[in-house]
Image: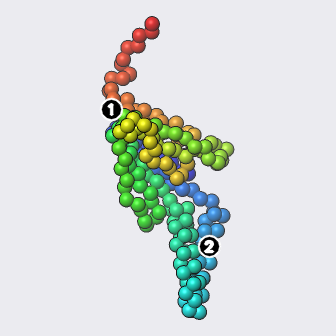
Amino acid sequence: MKVKIEYDGTNVHLSIEAETSRLAKLVMFLLNAIGIALIIIAILEWLLALLIMGALWVLFFGWLTLWNFFGRELITINTRSLSYQQYYGFFKTKVEKKAVNRALNISLIPTLERQKKKHFQLIFETFNEFNLPEEIYRTSLPISETDLELLKKSIRLLYIKKVYPDYIKLSYLLN
């Protein structure tokens, strides 16, 4: 996965892009070719059931192909909200914005290791109006452990700067 984390002082921008192997891309391409062939045969032979099956085949595998070739998630975090959007190449979903109440927590789901590195799927959680934890977004694409540490540092900078700018200058009582 290609991960890009930017901190601009008020927001943390996280972009996770899919990296699919050549073999998987080839399989997706072949599955789409089969679906297109089904549609062509159905049109030439006037077979309505085969046409419907071919259309559903192309829709399903076309969506998967777009995600595996061009899939990207863009997440923007600030102290008040979390917004996210998915890109499928030429198609993108609308920006969804969720309010962050009191605090933002990130839970991890371990996924398969890639290139001998641990990867995690992220779950962003906050508190609802009853002060109960609730999930506001779950990433589809995993990030590596090193990228996770960079994301944590960026979010800490965001909250420390917003909550109390002179946090570093505080004196500590050691008794």
Image quadrant in which you'd find residue 101: top left
How many marks the image carries: the answer is 2
Q: Nearer the viewer, residue 74 or 122?
A: 122
Give the Cα distance between marks 2 and 1: 50 Å
The residue located at (60%, 88%) in the rendering is 41
Q: Nearer the viewer, residue 50 or 7?
A: 50
* Image position of 80 (left or right of 104): left
Graded by Cα atoms within 10 Å as few (under 14), some (14 to 19) or many (20 or more), the crowding at tag 1 reads some
- Residue 150 in view, yes or no: no
Q: Position of residue 133 (x, y in %)?
A: 44, 38
**Mark 1 highlights which residue?**
162
* Image position of 130 (left or right of 51): left
The residue located at (63%, 43%) in the rendering is 117
Image quadrant in which you'd find residue 78: top left
Image quadrant for the C terminus?
top left
Q: Nearer the viewer, residue 59 or 13?
A: 59
Q: Position of residue 36 (x, y in %)?
A: 57, 80
Please tell me whether mark 1 sits on a helix, a strand or a loop: helix
**Mark 2 highlights which residue?**
31
The residue located at (55%, 89%) in the rendering is 43
Image quadrant in which you'd find residue 165: top left
Work out whether 128 lies above or below 175: below
Work out whether 68 lies above or below 13: below
Q: Earlier in the sequence, mark 2 or mark 1?
A: 2
Q: Position of residue 49 (x, y in %)?
A: 57, 84
Q: What's under tag 2, amino acid-wise? A: Leu
* Image position of 27 (left or right of 156): right
Please tell me whether mark 2 sits on a helix, a strand or a loop: helix
Q: What's under tag 1, amino acid-wise? A: Lys
